[in-house]
Amino acid sequence: MTRTLITGGTIVTASDTYKADVLVDGEKVAMIGKGLKPDGAKKLDAGGMYVIPGGIDVHTHMELPFGGTTASDDFETGTRAAAFGGTTSIVDFAVQGFGEPLRKAQDLWLKKAQGKAVIDYGLHMIVRDVSDKVLREMDTLVRDGISSFKLFMAYPGVFMLDDGAIFKALVRTGENGGLICMHAENGGVIDVLVKKALAEKKTAPKWHALTRPPEVEGEATGRAFKLAEMAGGVPLYIVHLSAAQALEQVRLFRDRGLPAYAETCPQYLFLSYDNYEEPGFDGAKYVMSPPLRPKWHQDELWKGLARNDLQVVSTDHCPFCMKEGFAGMPKQKELGKGDFSKIPNGAPGVETRMALMYDGGVVGGRITLNRWIELTSTTPAKIMGMFPRKGTVAVGSDADLVLWDPKATQVLSAKTHHMRVDYNPYEGRKVRGRASVVLSRGEVIVQDGKFLGKTGRGRFVKRGAPVLQT
């Protein structure tokens, strides 16, 4: 087995910052200490750099069918892009077909990933109907390492479940140790607002945001936590929280000592409703659900991250191209020209998350260096049942490590990113900090801007029960 000695760096975890060497033996961290001199180990000089646990993005959608098309990144292109950005594990979403067994969706998504993924991956299960059979399957999946289930309070006729079905699923995870991940928007109200806007010939991309006001997210978030409380105070995790109104509900229930958790995404911290006002059809780049909010919400979300009302930063990576034909892609965002409701919902981000959060958070003075690691790696690993195998630099943990250069700068651009999409939401933004070397299970897969890994080397991660703290 290959042995690698990482020397001269500063180790940064969620709790500590210190100078030490790291010995990697095969796929694991074997030793941490000063002045290590193992025989036969290949050396990596981390002088002037941070040695951090690889990023963990627990919300991605590779090759997701949506709105008449499919997300432009598959498990090969998407995980390679993730690696370039310093992310070494993802958790993607398998989608249950109506009336079909959950196992069928699991097998389909494993087939999509196997032979393609270049980093390790886990799966959540999107549940679209809650029958007694499906509830029993949830028990089996938890035992088999798929321990989280996404439910929707939005998209009537596509994903949306009623409160009764949601309540049944919450009760079940209270029994089997799984975790419900909730898309919290009031889908019924949104549907009425969308139909009204289209009837009034309001078709531009900005109407996607104007028909999904922050209040529909706040109402649904509060309702979701009340259902979780009625189910016995079971844990509940809100995905892609975007609005101060929703954050207020998270804080309310956490302050009462309930196991309430939530993630936000970089787009809600760095972009705003103003982007929908870009000329022509360019606002379609930012059509995602929930939508971007007015700028004042950004400060509230940053406060939530600093105070631990928000525990995770993920991406909701789900890219769709603007122009037909890019990398062989069919028409995607342009499906919604003349009707904002037909624009595929989603945007790229798996490659830019770590740098944006370092630059805007740490360099910007909004969060500490350790909190950056906590939000992007350690807490995601804990909540999603991957810790301490993933999410830290410790003896016995997987050697998913990043040598992070805090002095390097980069300009985010579609011209240089590795995501298979023809635009970058942060086009032209200069950020400080970059992943210089990336190791996945002890193997150097990215170094100095070059990909050295092999397609298909990523492995499925069986996840355990969440490690939760209020």
Image: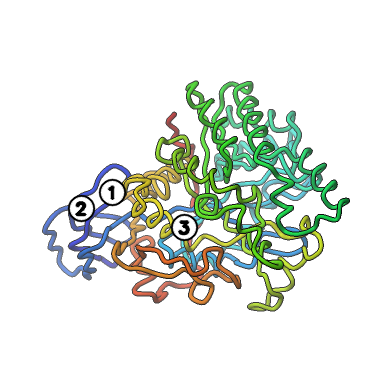
- Decide: few, some or many residues near mark 3? Use Cα within 10 Å; few <14, some 14-19, many ≥20: many
Q: Which residue is mark 2?
A: 32
Q: Residue furthest right?
A: 199
Residue 45 visible from this viewpoint? yes
For numbered disc 3, what is the local secondary structure? Answer: helix
- Badge 2 element: strand
Please name the residue shown 60% across and 42% down the image. Answer: 141
The quarter of the rendered structure image containing the N terminus is bottom left
The residue under label 3 is which amino acid type? Arg
Tell me which residue sits at (41%, 49%) in the image. 377
Q: Is residue 288 left or right of residue 115?
A: right
The nearer-to-camera label among 3 and 2 is 3
Which residue position holds label 3?
Answer: 353
Placement of the C terminus among the 4 image quadrants: top left
Q: Which residue is mark 1?
A: 394
Q: Nearer the viewer, residue 239 or 252?
A: 252
Q: CA distance from mark 2 to mark 1?
A: 8 Å
- Of residue 434 and residue 126, the one placed in the foreground of this image is 434
Position of 90 relative to 412 (above/below) = above
Classed neighbour count for the residue bearing mark 1: other residues with Cα under 10 Å, few (<14), some (14–19), many (≥20): some
Report whether residue 115 is seen: no
